[in-house]
Image (cartoon, helix red, strand yellow):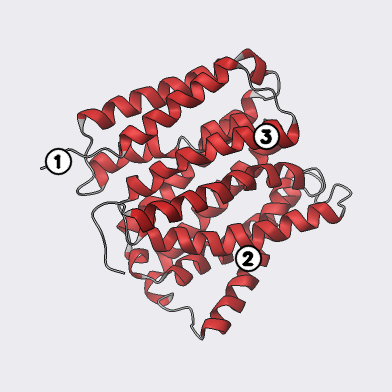
Amino acid sequence: MERKSALDLVGAAGMVAFASILALNQVVIKLTNTGIGPVFGAGLRSVLALGVLMIWLLLRRRRVTGLRRTLWPGLGLGLVFAAEFLLLFVALDHTSVSRSAILFYSMPVWLALVAHVALPGERLSQARVIGLILAMAGVIWALSDPESRAAGSLFGDAMALLAAFAWVGIALIVRLTRVSGLPAESQLFWQLSVSGVVLCAAAPLFGDLLRSPDWIHWAGLGFQASIVACLSFLFWLKWMSIYPASDIAAFSFLSPVLSVALGWALLGEPVGPGFLGALVLVSVGIVLITVRRKR
């Protein structure tokens, strides 16, 4: 598909499905962490997802290409990917799904700010500035909500925010370096191969590797490795090569909404009226970020 200047119906539908999977993934990570150490689980996820990617390539009779000419940016991409999921998995070990989702999926706010100066054609309009202000206000309101604060921790919240910054780094590397010329499979190969080694090597520094895992923990790990870390990210990287980065990121406003709902429904996390109001502010703000002035 050729590159497009804005999201169309196909692009929007794909992003709705992608956001739903990411929302469920927050809950799955939280559950998996109870049986498998967070950093070790993140590393295993990358290793297993790399195996799924290889099977995908064999079935489609394709191969990983362009690795030699993208060695340094590819290694950088893999390291930032490793940092993102080390931070996210540790965050969900210390804070609630609801708070983590608000912070992690604030990524479009930070990407829009950086894209204003770093990505051509993605400058901030008046409506997008208003969206940034609303989204930031919503994040601050959500973090100060007394009902949800009892289920979280400042350390976990900080890790989730840093994970969002790492996600911004991935988007920028994909757009601004030679990695942008790679097919999605090669980009994902860099992310999974480097992160698998780095995270598994670092895992012993973060406590026990296993926490008496049961079948549900291994099932959760399998879901993350196959559906989330491999097939969904192949989709995301492909969409990043077709549609504007800030438009793609903006659809992540659905993920915190769904994550909060799933955290409440499946994990019994407290969600007060104030927190819901903050979620509305964040969602409206991120929607406004996608508004472009008509020429």
**Residue 294, label in figure:** 1
Label 1 or label 2, whichever lies nearer to me, is 1
Hey, what amino acid is under mark 1?
Lys
**CA distance for labels 1 and 2:** 42 Å
Q: Quadrant of the C terminus?
A: top left
Residue 234 x, y percent position in the rendering:
49, 64
**Residue 280, label in figure:** none
Closer to the chain start, of discs 1 and 2, is 2
- Does 76 sit above or below residue 68? above
Closer to the chain start, of discs 3 and 1, is 3
Residue extending furthest toward the top = 146
Q: What is the tally of numbered marks visible in this picture?
A: 3
Hey, what amino acid is under mark 2?
Ala
Q: What element carries label 1?
A: loop
**CA distance for labels 3 and 1:** 39 Å
Q: Mark 3 points at which residue?
A: 263
Label 3 or label 2, whichever lies nearer to me, is 3
Marks 3 and 2: CB-CB under 8 Å?
no
Crowding at dot 3, Cα within 10 Å, few <14 / some 14-19 / many 20+, comes out as: many
Q: Mark 2 points at which residue?
A: 49
Residue 290 x, y percent position in the rendering:
31, 40
